[in-house]
Image (cartoon, rainbow, N blue to C red):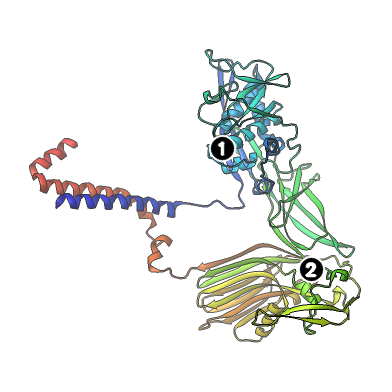
Amino acid sequence: MAENFLVAFLVVVLVGLVWASALSQVFCSSVPSATSNFESSYKVSVQNGFYVADHTLYVSVPPSVHEYYNGKSHTVINEMDYVKYVTPSAVQSMADNIREVTNATPYNDEEFANAVLMMVHEVPYVKSNAKYPVETLVDNQADCDGLSILAASIMKAGGVNVVLLLYNDITPPHMNIGVNLAQMPVSHSWWTVPSGIEYENKTYWVAECTSLADWTVGDRPELLSSAKPIVIPLAGSEKNSPAKVASSLDSGLLSSSISINLTAVYANGSDARIINVSGSVSPASPNVSVTLYVNQPGYAPNAYQTVTDDFGNYAEVWNVTLPGTYIMRTSWSGFSNRSGSDSDAITVFIGAQQPVIQDSSSGFIGVETQTHSPWYMALFNKGSEEFLKSNLTGTNVVLSGDFMVLSDGHEIAPNETTVTVPAHRATYRVPRSSRTVTVFVPEQVITIPGAELLSSQFGFILQQNGASNYTASVKVLNDDELSQISQNIGASNAVIINASSVATKNAWHQAVARVVGDKATVEVYNESGDQLDNRSQSWSGQSSGEFAVLMTYPTGQIIAFKDLKVEAITQAPPATTQKLAEGNGFEFLYPYVSPLLLVAGVVLAIVCLWQRHGSKKCANAVRESL
């Protein structure tokens, strides 16, 4: 009986230890900020004769640099596709810093290559697809091709002639690099012979980039002794990167910052619009490169480059012709012992200035026969976008963000357009039925008013769907949503501000919608933090409502958003079964649960043994174990 009880208890102890370990992971884990630079350091040793010097290479990668390469093509169809991953310009500062401590050595190219290999060997080997060097640095893991691409990029940036070596005739396939030197490698064991291959009348010495051993140039794993690699030259690698890594040697990188402003907009014709982007880097740094990233969700970012003036200020002009949603930010790569940084991200919505009329020769599409909802307005509403949406639960909730309507007052508004829609047949589905009917639509002449007669709306909307249940959104509104909000303006369950009466163009404003305790409030502030308008209402006993800041702007205008966020200040009480996972105030005890369980198990085991074999015998055994 005692034995069964002991076994059962030991099982419970083991389960408890696993449970405690899981708890420690839940409560002790942390997620780095999405806007923080990736920071890392690597050990580099340099041998000069009998003297070995140890150095630390510090690396900093702004998020935009990682996003730029993460958005590029990762397709590998044949071996030459690996060349596009080699990006020497992006890691130039790393190569320069390593070169600084290897140039004085007798065989500086070899010593440089070995120092790069030492650094790359610190990156853990994890099976993955091919990566750009920046991705490998940020992920801090890669497999043989990612590690080889990182090493080749740094070596090429340092002026070394290097190739990729792909071994497809072994299973699984493998990749390392070949390094061309002015002499046979000298930094190897005296009893080994360096391994190399001949390519275009040059010897490329094998350099293994995985961390299975302390490989140096000329060392070849035994597994590859009979394998014949495919040589991949790097002539087609990236020549210049707008996105660069910052690094320093033997001292940490100091922080920096960069600002971004959007100013006047000039309408160049009826479609193209020009946005002026400006800002400054801090500390003020003259003649440094600044990159403007413009990204449409789902597409790789486009990069535009400019340089700062004598005071660290920059300016760039962005010409956009297509309506849509864009995310803009600027970045600089730092210098010397200064890390690079990213500006705030600004979401820019550019609406269509006028409806697009489809050629009638192939049949007119999109004609709306209901006179109270003109078809051309549907085309404008088709551009409606949602920039933030979140469902949340809590007793106190806040939706906030900054907005700006961009204009220089010179937008070209199109004149009235008359369109003749030819007679045609249209097919409609019968409501609540799968049947369709075809009707003959006679010729129509439609006059489309100029864009100056039309307007659009966007809003910060906090919708209460029930007790402690909310939907928060920032969006450009369509007709149905506007109609619904208009009906609610005078209702007792709505608190709404029309910011058009207080907000000016070309200036940032903050919108806030909050529910705290028994009060719902909406507010608008200017760029200086002065409150321009506010509405509030007691909310005791209400189960649903709508709280919004609305803004009217001319159709085709440009609006910008930043710092959009929504949060539940006070979470709703969690279900009983979820209290532990969500935190109950005793998190500080969890590190001590494991040893306590272990001690309890040992004590109970001693008691059981005492009962089974007698107190004297058990006491002797315990004394001997001590």
With respect to residue 210, does 407 lie above or below? below
Name the amino acid, label 2. Answer: Lys
Confirm whether residue 55 shows in the render. Answer: no
Question: Label for residue 505?
Answer: 2
**Which comes sooner in the sequence, label 1 or label 2?**
1
At 91% from the left and 73% from the top, the residue drawn is: 415
Query: Which quadrant holds the C terminus?
Result: top left
Which image quadrant is residue 360 in? bottom right
Separation (CA) of disc 1 from disc 2:
52 Å
Which image quadrant is residue 426 in? bottom right
* Percent x, y of residue 22: 39, 52
| 366 sits to left or right of 617 | right
What secondary structure is found at the residue carrying circle 2?
A: loop
**Badge 1: residue crowd in 10 Å (few <14, some 14–19, many ≥20):** many
Name the amino acid, label 1. Answer: Asp
Towards the viewer: 427 or 608:
427
Question: Label for residue 43?
Answer: none
At 20% from the left and 50% from the top, the residue drawn is: 6
Confirm whether residue 266 shows in the render. Answer: yes
